[in-house]
Image (cartoon, helix red, strand yellow):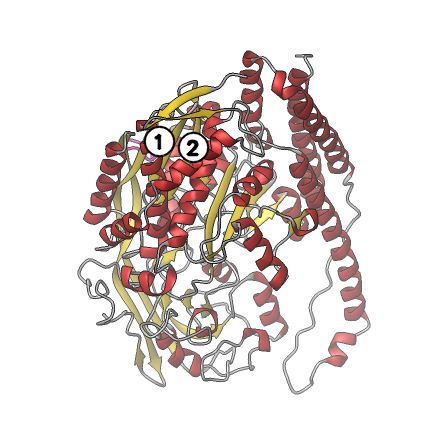
């Protein structure tokens, strides 16, 4: 195999073949990389970037993009700003008031704090609101719906509570926020209020800001409520780039806007409304931490909700910075983090942004010292992520054909804090992630971040691991950050990495997500910012240096096999549960067991669950497992002697593998999402549904569709295995 020699200030480093265990020369490069990482740089950048509110379309948002681009240019990158034009509504009217019998007007404000230097920048701050709520003016009784997810409405139905014509109030949590108004509208509600209960991130968790990290009584979580499980990006240009002259939908025809007005509020503003409710006492699992008895409602009080928005098209600015590869310039290793925020955004997203910038600076220093990455390295700073992954989606849609040919891996970060490594993504990269995590040290415990992550999972029994607890099992990606358009729209292998779990706090999407809050409570020393840089930087260096890309398929095949067993069990469990419930309904057990002094509506019998034919999936998994084992064996025996031209051909196959898991037709009812293994759930939002077409058809009791999608996904996996066999053929000299 051929090695490249480079000089770093008189020191020679040889970059040789990257594998699951990087050789000594690559480790020397990574150690040199580490010397360029500086917590003080991250601190200074965070202070600069979070100094003013920088929401999408704001002056400081553009200034930040220009600042980041200038930094990359100074580090030797070819950096440019790519602009798109997107729909971004901002509020002009927000009214929430109880109209009787008790009068109350919500403050809808987060007051400045002396302890937080930027919290008083009120003239530049976006007020608290949910973007992409429709305009509306409604007055109605209120019903408390817990988290406002489908199972909560089943509970309401059994208690005889109907939300039709009502305004619902839901607490944050249990799902992504956009699901709450979606489900409320499906059940006939005319408005939706979402509040932050102190049980989730307020005084129930710890001291509130500014004494502690957690959300105080005035803190509000802003956020988008687009129906992102349908598609991400600009609402008016689905599937195409939102250029200035792009053909746009009419706003009235846009399917991802809410159907009812929706507004977020603090628990200080929510308390009088919840106090006014009567009706049944809420189930124990529905009770938050406010000093009241939680009732479902409705009550005698009525609430008036009025919202009006400026529906503007605004420019967004993506920073794209490249260092050209020396041997494979048309193979791109991509690393991204967004830079826009709802207000000042110190933790979300700038804690991740400054860590990726530190990586870029260090890689630039390596290149100045003589190191030459084999592949092109691309760092991205996305705009308008908060609205619905606009910056990354529009760029991915604009460059879709090129990316399908050139993109190797996209590695994403977002917020960062103290604690444990979190990693999720394409399972063909699971071994690769473990190899990197084994080589990065935790700054607090002086053990590897892999060991610390595994210790956390064992101690609280959350998550999963492999090999008797010796290796991290990657989580699957749903949505919620900028990996989505790459993985689920284009079929590019992707990872999402970050640290957290010991930082706590309730500043998310509020004016208090500030430099002062971050440096007191989240990562005061910026040690975990540097640790994220060490982690992401190693991933980039190893992928950019590898003669053969480090994808591995046995873990992917094992994971898909587990998913198939899960959906099979799901159908079996639903069949047994349906039979049992129908029996209880028929023999009146439920009715007779109910408290006669309380309203109880016996559920209607459900259609029996048929026996589905999972053979196409099971056979496809068997084929996949055989192909993965053959590739594992062949790569172990033949890779070191594979001629260079065949390595290039093998890399082309490896780059294409994730794309083989997509279908041009996409998922049923949502063609934008094309990946057949990973997707956000229709009613989870951020939360992943694996084998989504099959799993959700079963969950929604669409038996004909489930049967059809079992065949479709089985065929997709068969084609994937067939493509992998071509890689085996190359290794074995048969191609």
Q: Position of residue 614 (x, y in %)?
A: 76, 40
Disc 1 and disc 2 in contact, CB within 8 angstroms: yes
Q: Residue furthest left?
A: 123
Q: Residue at 53% of width from left, 82% of height from top?
A: 279
> Magenta segment: does it hold 691?
no
Q: Main secondary structure of the magenta part?
A: loop
Camera-nearest residue between 519 and 346: 519
Q: Quadrant of residue 221?
A: bottom left
Camera-nearest residue between 116 and 566: 116
Q: Which span is picked out in magenta?
A: 241-247
Camera-nearest residue between 10 and 358: 10
Q: Quadrant of residue 217?
A: bottom left
Which residue is under mark 2? 29
Q: Position of residue 273 (x, y in %)?
A: 40, 78
Which residue is under mark 1? 366
Residue 412 visible in the picture: no
Residue 51 visible in the picture: yes
């Amino acid at each position: 195999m051929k090695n490249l020699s480079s000089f770093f200030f008189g020191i020679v480093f040889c970059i040789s073949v990257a594998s699951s265990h990087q050789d000594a020369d690559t480790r020397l490069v990574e150690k040199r990389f580490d010397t360029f990482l500086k917590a003080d740089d991250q601190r200074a950048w965070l202070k600069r970037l979070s100094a003013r509110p920088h929401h999408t379309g704001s002056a400081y948002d553009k200034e930040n993009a220009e600042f980041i681009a200038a930094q990359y240019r100074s580090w030797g990158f070819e950096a440019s700003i790519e602009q798109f034009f997107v729909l971004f509504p901002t509020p002009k009217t927000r009214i929430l008031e109880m109209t009787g019998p008790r009068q109350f007007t919500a403050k809808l404000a987060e007051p400045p704090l002396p302890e937080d230097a930027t919290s008083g920048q009120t003239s530049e701050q976006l007020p608290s609101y949910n973007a992409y709520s429709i305009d509306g003016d409604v007055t109605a009784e209120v019903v408390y719906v817990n988290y406002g997810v489908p199972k909560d409405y089943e509970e309401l139905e059994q208690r005889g509570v109907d939300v039709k014509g009502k305004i619902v109030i839901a607490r944050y949590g249990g799902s992504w926020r956009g699901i709450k108004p979606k489900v409320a509208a499906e059940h006939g509600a005319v408005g939706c209020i979402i509040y932050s209960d102190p049980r989730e991130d307020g005084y129930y968790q710890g001291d509130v800001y500014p004494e502690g990290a957690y959300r105080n009584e005035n803190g509000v979580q802003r956020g988008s409520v687009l129906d992102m499980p349908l598609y991400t990006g600009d609402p008016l240009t689905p599937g195409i780039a939102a250029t200035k002259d792009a053909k746009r939908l009419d706003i009235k025809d846009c399917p991802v806007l809410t159907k009812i007005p929706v507004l977020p509020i603090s628990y200080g503003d929510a308390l009088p409304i919840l106090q006014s409710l009567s009706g049944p006492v809420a189930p124990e699992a529905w009770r938050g931490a406010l000093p009241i008895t939680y009732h479902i409602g409705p009550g005698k009080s009525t609430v008036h909700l009025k919202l009006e928005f400026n529906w503007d098209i605004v420019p967004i600015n993506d920073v794209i910075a490249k260092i050209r590869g020396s041997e494979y310039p048309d193979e791109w290793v991509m690393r991204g983090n967004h830079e826009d925020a709802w207000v000042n955004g110190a933790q979300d997203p700038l804690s991740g942004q400054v860590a990726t910038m530190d990586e870029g600076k260090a890689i630039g220093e390596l290149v100045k010292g003589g190191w030459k990455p084999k592949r092109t390295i691309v760092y991205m700073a996305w705009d308008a992520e908060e609205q619905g992954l606009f910056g990354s989606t529009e760029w991915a849609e604009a460059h879709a054909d090129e990316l399908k040919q050139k993109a190797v891996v996209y590695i994403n970060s977002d917020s960062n804090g103290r604690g444990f490594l979190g990693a999720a993504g394409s399972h063909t990269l699971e071994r690769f992630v473990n190899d990197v995590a084994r080589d990065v040290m935790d700054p607090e415990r002086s053990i590897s971040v892999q060991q610390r992550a595994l210790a956390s999972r064992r101690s609280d029994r959350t998550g999963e691991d492999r090999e008797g607890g010796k290796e991290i099992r990657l989580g699957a990606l749903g949505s919620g950050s900028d990996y989505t358009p790459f993985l689920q729209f284009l079929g590019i292998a992707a990872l999402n990495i970050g640290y957290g779990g010991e930082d706590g706090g309730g500043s998310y999407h509020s004016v208090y997500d500030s430099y002062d809050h971050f440096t007191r409570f989240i990562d005061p020393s910026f040690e975990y910012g540097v640790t994220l840089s060490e982690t992401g930087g190693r991933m980039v260096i190893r992928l950019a240096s590898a003669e053969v890309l480090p994808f591995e398929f046995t873990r992917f095949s094992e994971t898909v096999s587990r998913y198939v067993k899960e959906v099979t069990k799901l159908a079996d469990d639903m069949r047994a549960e349906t039979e049992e419930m129908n029996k209880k309904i028929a023999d009146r057990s439920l009715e007779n067991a109910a408290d006669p002094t309380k309203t109880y509506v016996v559920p209607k019998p459900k259609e029996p669950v048929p026996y589905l034919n999972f053979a196409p999936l099971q056979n496809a998994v068997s084929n996949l497992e055989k192909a993965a084992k053959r590739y594992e064996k062949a790569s172990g025996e033949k890779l070191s002697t594979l001629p260079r031209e065949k390595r290039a051909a093998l890399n082309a196959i490896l780059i294409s593998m994730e794309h083989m898991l997509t279908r041009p037709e996409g998922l049923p009812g949502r063609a934008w999402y094309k990946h057949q293994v990973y997707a956000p759930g229709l009613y989870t939002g951020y939360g992943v549904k694996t084998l989504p077409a099959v799993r959700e058809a079963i969950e929604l009791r669409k038996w004909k569709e489930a049967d059809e999608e079992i065949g479709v996904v089985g065929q997709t996996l068969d084609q994937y295995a067939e493509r992998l066999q071509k890689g085996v053929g190359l290794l074995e000299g048969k191609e």
